Image (cartoon, rainbow, N blue to C red):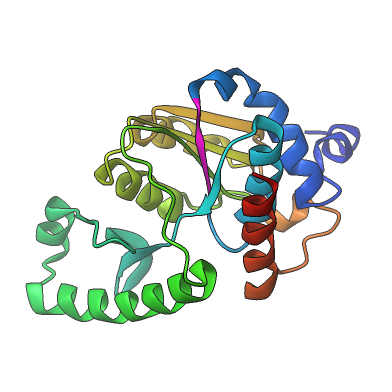
Amino acid sequence: MDMQQELEARFADRSAAGRRLAARLEHLRDQRPVILGLPRGGVPIAYEVAQALGAPLDVIVVRKLGVPWLPELAMGAIGEDGSRVVDRALLRHERIADDLLAEVEERESAELRRRAQIYRAGRDPVSIDGRLVVLIDDGIATGATARAACLVVKQRAAARVVLATPVLPPDLISPLGRVADELVWLCAPDPMVAVGNWYEDFEQLTDAEVVDLLARAGQSR
């Protein structure tokens, strides 16, 4: 990718990326999708998509269960409603005992509950049973969290899962396309280096900003 192409591929901020992504997802409008943003960075993008498609917005609070000595390698994932997926083949390959898995799961469960309590602010999760779900993040680097979110959403009985992001590395297109029913992206630079490189404004969001976006989405509906 030359310098001119790189400049054209960059996004002003997450909201601008969300509006561009919404245009790519317009074909889903009549399928009554539920939009789920991965906190924190995926939520402002998901907000723009939900507004454009007239769809409900929620967060997907999920915690990856990383192998202790290889944290980016997911041996499973948990969701806030008790959903749980475990890669038994990986556990056997890495010789991870049940007590070590339980230790990691207990730690991640505590953080999941903390985040869910903050983001939910007393609201129940939007039901996704039998619905088309669009999972959105502001960018995908390793794919571990996105993959975990897809697996958790499928266990929560979503009818179909679309994973959407403004930017991801090209070598993740094939593997993520196998875990999601549909993968949508705006650019796949090689090399990608870091997600933040593709935004002019990539300020970190606060929990309060996430809660505000969710509240605004609820009021607009």
Q: Is residue 41 visible?
A: no
Numbered range of the magenta stretch? 32-37
Residue ID at (72%, 42%): 18
Above or below 203: residue 175: above
Picture quadrant where residue 71 is located: bottom left
132 drawn magenta: no
| Dominant secondary structure (helix, strand or loop) of the stretch shown in magenta | strand
Count all numbered tags in the image, as a single digit.
Answer: 0
Split into 4 quadrants, where in the image is the N terminus? top right
Residue 200 lies, in percent from the top left, at 86, 54
Residue situated in front as seen by the camera: 95 or 205: 205
Q: Residue at x 49, y 52 (%)?
A: 142
Is 35 colored magenta in this rendering? yes
Q: Is residue 169 above or below residue 66?
A: above
Q: Position of residue 182 (x, y in %)?
A: 45, 26
* Residue under the image location 13 percent in, 57 percent down: 93
The answer to whether one can see residue 173 in this image is yes
Q: Quadrant of residue 125?
A: bottom left
Quadrant where the C terminus is found in the figure: top right
Q: Nearer the viewer, residue 184 or 143?
A: 184
71 to the left or right of 166: left
In the rendered image, which quarter is residue 197 located in? bottom right
Give the left or right position of residue 88, taking residue 179 as reference: left
Front-lying residue, 149 or 68: 149
The location of residue 126, given as percent across then percent down, is 44, 50
Relative vertical location of residue 29 with respect to residue 81 in this rendering, above or below: above
**Which residue is at 38% across, 46% downward?**
127
